[in-house]
Image (cartoon, rainbow, N blue to C red):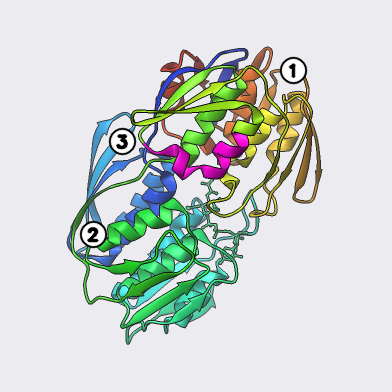
Amino acid sequence: MTEKIRIRGKQIVNGVVPISGAKNAALPLLAAVLLSSEKILLRNVPPLEDVRTMLSLLDDMGVRFHIRADSSYASTIELQADAVNDFRASYDIVKRMRASILVLGPLLARFGECSVSLPGGCAIGVRPVDLHLKGVEALGATVSLKDGYIHARSPRGLRGTEYRFPISTVTGTENMIMAAALADGKTILENAAQEPEVVDLANCLNKMGACISGHGSGTIEIDGVANLHGVDYAVGPDRIEAGTYAIAAGITNGCVDLMGGNFRELLPCFVEKMTEAGLVFTDIGGGLRVESSGKISPIDIETAPYPGYPTDLQAQSMALLCIAAGISNIHENIWENRFMHVAELARMGANIKVASTHARIYGVEQLQGAPVYATDLRASFSLVLAALAAEGVTVLDRVYHLDRGYCKIEKKFAGCGVKIERFR
Ligand code: EPU
C-alpha cells in the first residue's frame, strides 16, 4: 500500500523554513563525480529519493561512497570514482528517474563509452534526449540506438566544438559542459541554459580544475583539460523549494522566513509576479521573508527558462490563483503536459479551463478538502498547498512523488505550526 498524507485545512503557515540543497543541482554534481578518480566531498546534499536513485546508479557503476547525515535536511557525501567498471544506466533506474541521462557526458568524456536506457514518456511530457545526443555527436562521439538503449562511444576521445542548442535544455547543457570539460580543445555552447543549477555545476567543475567561463549567460566556453581533481563543494539552495514555501505562506495568510540563499536573485520573475499577486517580500539576514498581504490578486504567468518564471513552480502557483479575486492565466511553455494537477484541483472546487498548454483560472472564494492523487512531484505539492487553504480534510495518495524532491515536508511544516500526518 502506498503512503498517504492527511491535511486538515485552514492552517496558517507561520515560521522559519531552512531551505535544503537543490535537487536539480545535486543530481548533476553527483554525476560529475564520474569525471575524476580523486575523492570528492559534496556537502549540503538534500536527503531525497532522487538523490538515492542517483547514488544507486553510481553504485552499480562501481563508485564508492559514504553518506554522513549532518542534519535532517542535509548530508555530506564522500565519493570516489577510481574503480568504475560498468558504463551502463539500466532501464530499471532510468524509468525511475530521467535525470539518469546525466551520466552520459561524464562517462563518455572519461571512459569513451556509455549505454543509457532511453527514457520513455512521463507524466509531464515526452521528454526526448535528442539534443543531448546531437551535442555529444558534435563533440565527436558516435551514437547508436539498440534494444531500447543509447550506446555512445568516443574511443579516440572527444574534440572541442561549437554547438548551438535549438532550444534551451538544462540537463542537456549540463551533459555538454561535463563532456567538454575533458575534451581536446575549446567548446563553445550557444543558447545554453542559464539556470542557477547549471552555474553550480560549472563552479564545482572549475574548482576541480576545469576551465569554464560564461556560465549563467547563454554562451558558455569550455577549454578542455586532461584531468579533473578532487573537490570539497556545497550544493546551492533549492530555489524551487523556497518558492513553494513562499506560496504556502501566501495561500494560508501566513508568513515564512526562507533561510539559506539569496532567493530574490534566484527567483527574479517569481518574486515580481507574486508581488503583483499580493505577497510581500522583505530581505532579512541570510534569507527572504514572505508575507501574505491578506488578499490574492489574479495574475498572468508564462513559464520560461531562467530568469523567466520557472515551470517547476507552475503547479504550486496555480493552487494559489485558484482562490484569487478574479481570473488568472497560466501559459506553460516548457512541458506539453504539465496540467495533471488541474483535474485534482477541480475535485477540491477549483474552476480551471485548460486548452492545450494554456490554463484559465477563475478564482473561487473557497476550496474544499477531498481525496486526491499526486501525479508528479510539483503537482503533488500544489495539492498540499490547496489542502492547507481548503475547508475540511484532504487525503493525498501516492506521496512517493513528493519524497522524490521535497525534503521532510512534515518536519518543515511542523516548524511553521502546521500539522501534516503520513499514514498507510
Ligand atoms: N527537450 C528536447 N530535447 C532534448 C532535451 C529537452 O526536446 O534533448 C525539450 C523538453 O522536452 C522540454 C524542454 O526541452 O520541452 C526543456 O527541457 P529540459 O531539457 O530543460 O528539461 P530537463 O533538463 O529534462 C530540468 C529539470 C526539470 C525542469 C526542467 C525545466 C533536472 C534534473 N530537471 O529537466 O525539473 O522542469 O529542467 O526547467 O534538472 C522537477 O524538478 O520537477 C523537474 C521536472
In percent of width and height, residue 321 lies at 70, 30
Q: Dot 1 corresponds to which residue?
A: 366
Q: Circle 1: is it few (<14), some (14-19), or many (20+) Cα within 10 Å?
A: some
Structural distance between the alpha carbons of marks 1 and 2? 51 Å
- Tell whether circle 1 marks a residue whose Cβ is less than 8 angstroms from ligand 1: no
Assign the N terminus to one quadrant of the image. top right
Q: Secondary structure at mark 1?
A: loop
Compared to 139, does 64 lie above or below? Answer: above
Residue at 67% x, 54% y is 333
Residue 207: mark? 2
Residue at 65% x, 30% y is 277
Tell me which amino acid carries mark 3. Answer: Ala
In percent of width and height, residue 339 lies at 70, 43
Residue at 73% x, 24% y is 348
- Of 32 and 193, which appears nearest the observer? 193
Tell me the magenta residue range. 261-274
Q: Dot 3 corresponds to which residue?
A: 74
In percent of width and height, residue 121 lies at 63, 57
Taking the magenta stretch, the answer to whether it contains residue 228 is no
Structural distance between the alpha carbons of marks 2 and 3? 21 Å
First in sequence, mark 1 or 2: give its number: 2
Residue at 35% x, 73% y is 222
Tell me which amino acid carries mark 1. Answer: Gln
Which numbered disc, 1 or 2, marks the residue closer to the eye? Answer: 2
Compared to 332, does 215 lie above or below? Answer: below
